[in-house]
Amino acid sequence: MTGPRKLSQNRAEETRDRILEKARDAFAEHGFAGANVRDIAREAGTTHSMITYHFGTKDQLWRAAVRDMFQHIREEVFEPVEQEDHDSIAERFASMTRRYAAYCARHPEHARITIQETIRGGERLDWMVQEFVKADHASADWLQDLMDEGLVPRMPPESLLYIYVGMMQLPFVLAKEAQALGYDFESEAGIERHAESVLKLMLRN
């Protein structure tokens, strides 16, 4: 496809991507109830009617934003690690940790949206868990591999997973507090330092 039709399609995709980005920011900051679709449209440089055209209701916009959020973490963390060649489970874990730290810095809204919905509970949280979180947890066999290799202390895998996720996400969720204290987690050097710190805590060797 070339010409005006292709250009129009590209613009529509760019508009849709901007809407999803601004929607994630709004839902992360204000929660579902507090986020305003007209404000999201203004931030995205579009109109309320355009959001309705692309996504329908506010609930459908939230679901599209969350679906896109999990697509980002797959594309930026899991898929690249799966495509790499690693000599050991420790190298694979180190690569994932560095990529995950960078993802958390770029997308603190991921943890904030999860926290918002977890605090409230209900149908949206249940949908997110069933659609995405459960599958991600079920595929975390690398945790058992790390324990079997003696690289991390043996413990319930679910505890280890939440310990790891908490260590990775929290400095970026609390980035404004950290900045007020003079800590910079969001710079390239800060992201690298945090990833290496987590690896030092997690890995025995």
Image: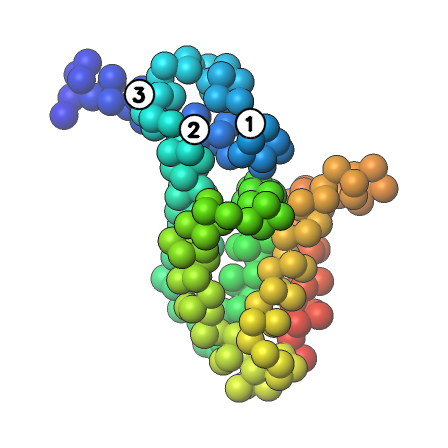
On the image, the x and y values in percent for residue 66 come to 44, 42
Q: Residue at x 75, y 43 (%)?
A: 184
Q: Is residue 9 left or right of residue 64?
A: left
N-term mark: 3 or 1: 1
Circle 1 SS class: loop
The answer to whether 4 is drawn above or below residue 164 in the figure is above
Q: Where does label 2 land, which residue?
A: 58
Q: Residues within 10 Å of mark 3 (few under 14, many from 20)?
A: few
Q: Residue at x 71, y 70 (%)?
A: 201
Q: Is residue 55 left or right of residue 166?
A: left
On the image, the x and y values in percent for residue 60 come to 38, 34
Q: Which of the 4 quarters of the picture holds residue 68?
A: top left
Marks 3 and 1 sit apart, C-alpha to C-alpha, by 18 Å
Circle 2 SS class: helix
Q: Amino acid at mark 2?
A: Lys
- Asked whether residue 205 is in view, the answer is no
Cβ atoms under marks 3 and 1 closer than 8 Å: no
Residue lying farthest left? 1
Q: Where does label 1 land, which residue?
A: 35
Q: Amino acid at mark 1?
A: Ala
State the residue in front, 30 or 180.
Answer: 30
Q: Is residue 98 left or right of residue 64?
A: right
Q: Residue at x 43, y 62 (%)?
A: 134
Q: Where does label 3 land, which residue?
A: 53
On the image, the x and y values in percent for residue 16 come to 36, 26
- Asked whether residue 85 is in view, the answer is yes
Marks 2 and 1 sit apart, C-alpha to C-alpha, by 9 Å
State the residue in front, 112 or 72.
Answer: 112
N-term mark: 2 or 1: 1
Q: Amino acid at mark 3?
A: Tyr
